Image (spheres, rainbow, N blue to C red):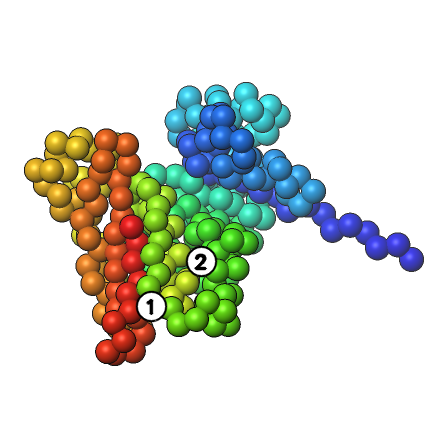
């Protein structure tokens, strides 16, 4: 008796900008986009469709994936192709509408993968989470660094005491807190075995991904701040992000679990 191979999962991508598809137009030497990941895992996934309101992004996708239908909205796409898995790689300010479009009616996907951060405020974040929970759709926010083998080995070494008593954890990562820098915050919590129970981001104009000049950073260094409370202790405010001419540096610190030990977790 031969076992038949399970059918491929039908995948789709909403948002065809950099993270959605166009990072792979750059000479990075590896897959950096959701479209590229589905194409590379073609033994598991069939890329069944995509959506983006921007005509240039749709045209670039069609050149890359001729024959794969491309739509102007997530609702139209879902209704037409009924995907199993959908990646959301849209700008943050339209996320709530995209979740509404994907989860309405009977054509909701079986799982959603969303680029980080999920949202910029607690209300929108929980609306997205609750919509998925109500529909029974698993939601994965794309903090994927903790699944890399190098960080898993570090985590195992800490948990098993292979490197002795840990008094400090420092994660160094360039770019702003909302983009690559947010991976640093996730890694800090992962390695320190902490989970936030409350947190709040301060909305400041300088958080825009377009960047700021070094001159502006000197005049106004308070570019980013994040307040977080983790289960065992209160986390200090994330220090200001002061960009150099090339990168922005994220810094965060918190006392370690327990009192009086003087241990610190930090992001630099």
The residue located at (50%, 66%) in the rendering is 157
Foreground mark, 1 or 2, reads 1
Secondary element under disc 2, as helix, strand or loop, is helix
In the picture, the disc for residue 167 is: 1
**Residue 12 location in percent, x, y?**
54, 40
Dot 1 or dot 2, earlier in sequence = 2
**Residue 106 location in percent, x, y?**
53, 52
Q: Residues within 10 Å of mark 1 (few under 14, many from 20)?
A: few
Q: Is residue 236 left or right of residue 101?
A: left
**Residue 230 location in percent, x, y?**
29, 69
Above or below: residue 266 compared with residue 120 = below
Q: Quadrant of the N terminus?
A: bottom right
**Residue 3 location in percent, x, y?**
84, 55
Q: Which residue is mark 2?
A: 132
**Residue furthest right as drawn:** 1
Q: Is residue 114 left or right of residue 226?
A: right
Nearest the camera: 147 or 140? 147
The residue located at (35%, 46%) in the rendering is 173
The residue located at (78%, 50%) in the rendering is 5
């Amino acid at each position: 008796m031969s076992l038949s191979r399970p059918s491929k999962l039908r995948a789709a991508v909403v948002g065809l900008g950099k993270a959605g598809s166009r990072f792979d137009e750059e000479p990075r030497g590896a897959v950096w986009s959701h479209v590229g990941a589905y194409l590379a895992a073609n033994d598991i996934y069939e890329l069944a469709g995509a959506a983006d309101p921007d005509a240039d992004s749709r045209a670039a996708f069609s050149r890359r994936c001729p024959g794969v239908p491309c739509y102007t909205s997530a609702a139209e796409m879902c209704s037409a192709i009924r995907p199993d898995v959908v990646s959301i790689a849209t700008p943050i300010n339209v996320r709530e509408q995209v979740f509404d479009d994907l989860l309405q009616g009977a054509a909701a996907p079986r799982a959603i993968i969303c680029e980080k951060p999920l949202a910029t405020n607690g209300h929108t974040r929980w609306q997205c989470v609750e919509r998925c929970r109500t529909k029974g759709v698993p939601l994965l926010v794309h903090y994927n660094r903790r699944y890399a083998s190098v960080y898993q080995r570090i985590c195992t070494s800490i948990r098993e005491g292979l490197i002795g008593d840990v008094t400090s954890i420092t994660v160094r990562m360039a770019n702003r807190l909302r983009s690559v820098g947010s991976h640093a915050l996730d890694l800090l919590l992962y390695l320190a075995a902490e989970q936030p129970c409350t947190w709040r981001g301060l909305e400041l104009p300088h958080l825009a991904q377009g960047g700021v000049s070094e001159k502006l950073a000197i005049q106004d260094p308070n570019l980013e701040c994040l307040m977080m409370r983790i289960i065992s202790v209160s986390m200090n405010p994330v220090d200001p992000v002061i960009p150099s001419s090339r990168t922005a540096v994220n810094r965060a610190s918190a006392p370690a679990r327990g009192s009086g030990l003087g241990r610190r977790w930090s992001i630099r």
